Image (tube, rainbow, N blue to C red):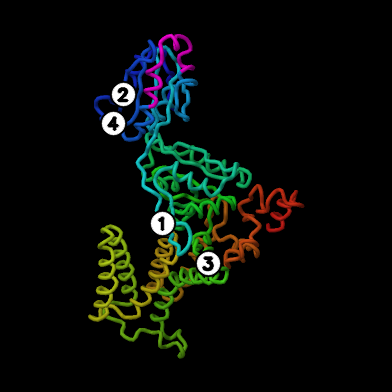
Amino acid sequence: MQEQRKIDVDIDKNINYLKDLLGVGESYDIVFREFKIGRRKAATFSINGMTNDIVLTNVYQAVMTCHPEELSINTLNKVFYQRLPHSQVKLLDNMNDSLVSMLSGEMLLFIEGEEQVIVIDARAYPVRSPSESNIEKVTRGSRDSFVETIPFNTALIRRRLRDANLRFEIVKVGARSKTDVAVCYIKDITNSGLVDTVKERLNGISIDGVPMAEKAIEEFITRGSKWNPLPKVRYTERPDVAAVHLLEGHVCLVVDTSPDIIILPTTFWHHVQHVEEFRQNMTAGTFLRMVRLGAVLLSLLLPPLWLAFALQPRLLPETLAFLGPRDPGVIPLGFQFLLAEFGVEMVRMATVHVPSAQSTALGFIGAFMLGEFASRVGLFGNEAIFYIAVATVGTFATPSVELAMAVRLFRILLLVLVIIFKLPGLLGGLLFVLLVTALTKSFGVPYLWPAMPFNYKAMKDVLFRLPLPNKLLRPAVLKPRDSDRLEDNRPGRQGSGKRQNKDEE
């Protein structure tokens, strides 16, 4: 642990220490200024590009125009309590915390003869305006999404949850990066044990920095096999989605420099739900949810299932004999599917890496020309291209990119097992996928809950888009402190929360 260095009464020692440490004169963006406050020497340190010039000018005008007689005694207290016009100021007595504050964009004000430093929050981060999410688009609803600056993101959540119990606790991660991570939860709803676990794991991260932000944080705080492709947290770019999960008793992590908010714990069902379902009426929302679930299942099962029967046509009844390949192509069927998977992934990666103006043309070339001409020259069968196309579309039906990638990897595994072992390989692979999914946990929550262990009321809620007035109970698996969503001042509310939570369990 780094030794705490106190602020010295000799201002020159403080100045020389920071000048040497920060490389004043070497790094152009370190701004150092010396001046007088009354008859006392003063100095400031700040970072160019991370501070608001107007705030700094107001601070300088306020402290440099003080009369010497006014500040002859108790200089620090008079400057702090009477002269500084800015609202966000604090006093620190050690150099370590002061240095972290300055590198975070705040300004340090040293005064000769004082054992404390004034820290002025004059930050002005570069930030883009909130715009519509590219992944979680809706036909109706808000068009704002999170950005890369943490104060903006917390404000977007606070705007939707004007609750005095909403908490944003800052944890700094990384010995060098000092990345701000805000642990967001509602104090009288979220299970305190879950909050303590999250903060303990964040404080236990021992690394020099996390420049990859949210993904690096996820890998440090999740438990279990790191080779398990199933996502144990959910990402969202929408503040309304984050607010809904907070009201259910989840914890959200807001990582500075990232527009993606981490929601935890999560189950499989969280990754196959979309905000669009709640922007439609109940019947349409249920239909959309069923289509999405069916698309994910088809994406996983359709290609390996068809391949298993195509390799063993005698297993098909005569009424389904038409499903077999009419023109199998030059390449063996199993390798056709693997090559098609490789080709689809190659096109997807290429469309991500090229400018958006070219991605449409590149996608058209990859999807139409390569697939069409591969079947025309006889390399691929039409059926292989069709089933891979259906599986690919089904993969993108979920807003969770991480779950889509996990489904794709499981599908490739099933295809390899079918090529080697035929139908028994498919059955064994499906059993393996089911076991991996069933044994996966996210912060102690079973991944398949409420299907395993089974909970009828909760299962009905994940399969169907139920009316919002009927969703009075929070998920029991989260063990919320307040289990129902009724207002506390309604008649007969006392004691009802614990009783209802117990009934659901």
> Which residue in the protein does label 1 denote?
133
Q: Mark 3 and mark 4: span between their CA atoms?
A: 51 Å
Would you say residue 75 sits in the magenta stretch?
yes
Q: Position of residue 408 (x, y in %)?
A: 40, 65
Going by the numbered disc 4, the residue's amino acid type is Asp
Q: Mark 3 and mark 2: span between their CA atoms?
A: 57 Å
> Which residue in the protein does label 2 denote?
32
Q: Is residue 428 in sight in this rendering?
A: no
In the image, which disc is placed on residue 29?
A: 4
Q: Mark 2 and mark 1: span between their CA atoms?
A: 40 Å
Magenta span dominant secondary structure: helix
Circle 1 packing at 10 Å, graded few (<14), some (14-19), many (20+), is some
Would you say residue 62 sits in the magenta stretch?
yes
Q: Mark 3 and mark 1: span between their CA atoms?
A: 19 Å
Going by the numbered disc 1, the residue's amino acid type is Ser
Quarter of image, res 35: top left
